[in-house]
Image (tube, helix red, strand yellow):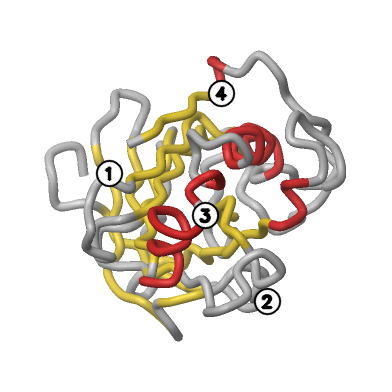
Amino acid sequence: MTRLCAASLICLGSLTFAAGCGGDEGDNHDVVNIELLRAGSGAEDPFVDTARIQVRLNYNQCLEDFYTMTNTEWEQGGEKGGPVFQEWIDRLCDRDVYDTSIDCEVAEIDQNLGSTSALNTSLKVTYTVLDPNLTRQRIFFGPLPNEDLVTDCRPEVKIDAGSVLGFNAAGEPIWEIESFTGFDTAYPGQNGPMSVSIRRSQAPGG
């Protein structure tokens, strides 16, 4: 498992797509996006007091093989992948690029390649939320290698019931996914979002 925190960076690229510590390597990568909806009638705002969001999406077999077998240099700790993951810490919350993004900063990107099962190889991004008005806002998630880099299969990620969680300033879980709307998989650069309906968490703090 490789972890990259915003505070640990010693070289950060600009917010343009062509610049950064990794040169142009980041242009072989893209994002998927998740739209946040209120569950039920929407009378209660489940996003009140949100300070942090954690998103974990599972890699499909194509991405697992890419990172663990055929192109290991692109993983987060790899020679090519390391600069790309650093560069995307700034990109993911750049509202000049993604104007429907939540108002956020990326706190951490954590790639898990520690299992041979595609259900357990994943990418996790933790976002610090600057504005908790999140209804119908989108979370942009990556970096993910696009089809310019992965040419022999379609790189996709999959969402599940525990993929998106909201926390308050004390670190307590306060909201979770109730259901999906539309599809539960996506590929880098796909226009449409994966939409999730959010309810207040039943765990302590919800």
Find residue 163 and name its label: none
Q: Is residue 117 above or below residue 85?
A: below
Circle 2 sits on which residue? 191
Q: Residues within 10 Å of mark 4 (few under 14, many from 20)?
A: some
In front of the other: 26 or 137: 26
x and y, in percent, of residue 134 in the image: 53, 52
Q: Looking at the picture, which amino acid does disc 2 mark? A: Asn
Q: Identify the residue position indicated by label 1 in the image.
A: 174
Q: Is residue 70 visible?
A: yes
Could you say which quadrant of the image residue 54 lies in?
A: top left
Q: CA distance from mark 1 to mark 2?
A: 29 Å
Q: Give the mark nearer the N terminus: 4 vs 3.
A: 4
Mark 3 residue element: loop
Q: CA distance from mark 1 to mark 4?
A: 24 Å
Q: Which mark is residue 71?
A: 3
Distance between the alpha carbons at the discs numbered 4 and 3: 25 Å
- From the viewer's perspective, is 97 left or right of 132? right
Whichever of callouts 1 and 2 sits on the residue coming sooner in the sequence is: 1
Tell me the kind of residue under disc 4: Ala
> Dot 1, crowdedness within 10 Å: few (<14), some or many (≥20)?
many
> Which one is in front in this view, the residue at disc 1 or the one at disc 3?
3
Give the numbered dot on residue 6: 4
Image coordinates for residue 93, horizontal then vertical, percent: 66, 43
Q: Which residue is pictured at 39% across the width and 33% down the height?
A: 2
Crowd around label 2: few <14 · some 14–19 · many ≥20 (10 Å): few
Q: Which of the two residues, 164 or 152, is positioned nearer the viewer here?
A: 152
Alpha-carbon span between mark 4 and mark 2? 27 Å
